[in-house]
Amino acid sequence: MGDLQDTLDDLAGFDWVPGIRKILNGFQEVADAATAGKLDADATQTTLTLLANPHGPDLPQALALLAAHLMTQHTNPALAFLDDDTVKTVQRLGEQHVFETAEYTPRDHPNEAAGLIYEAAEGRSQAMTYLDDAQRKELSDKVKKVNKDSQSRPR
């Protein structure tokens, strides 16, 4: 997990900010679940779509909107001390960030991977559903025979 773990460790120094620890723990929990084999294909492709979805809401959009929320005086009273020109500039920067995140953040690769996983899972599940009872029994019998004949299987 090298780079991800290093990044999460670096960001952990900011966990004094409310909510940051939960965000970082969420990233860690997803990574740990994947490593431990606790994410199935559906959960994996769904997570990839959440990380980068060119067709709808995703985590980069949520992060950009959070940044804009923090840069708007009426949603962040901590900015009340700013003069009007600075308030307008900071809010405009937040709006620009949301726009540029939507327009320029690359989202194709995780989304394409999610699609490939989905297609492969669908093909696999369809292949399994096309077996009739006789074919399932025949396949089951073959697996039993191979397992019985296996030299490396514990007895």
Image (spheres, rainbow, N blue to C red):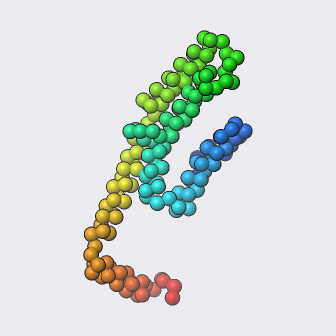
Front residue of 83/127: it is: 83
**Quadrant in which residue 91 is drawn:** top right
- Residue at 58% x, 56% y is 32
Front residue of 9/130: it is: 130
Query: Where residue 104 sits: x, y (%)?
Result: 44, 30
Residue 14 visible, this angle: no
Q: How many marks?
A: 0
Q: Is residue 104 above or below residue 35?
A: above
- Residue at 39% x, 41% y is 108
Q: Is residue 7 above or below residue 99?
A: below
Query: Where residue 71 sits: x, y (%)?
Result: 60, 24
- Residue at 61% x, 22% y is 74
Extreme residue in the right direction: 16
Residue 78 visible, this angle: yes
Front residue of 36/126: it is: 126
**Quadrant in which residue 10 is drawn:** top right
Query: Where residue 46 sits: x, y (%)?
Result: 44, 50
Extreme residue in the front direction: 74
Query: Where residue 89 sits: x, y (%)?
Result: 57, 16
- Residue at 42% x, 87% y is 148
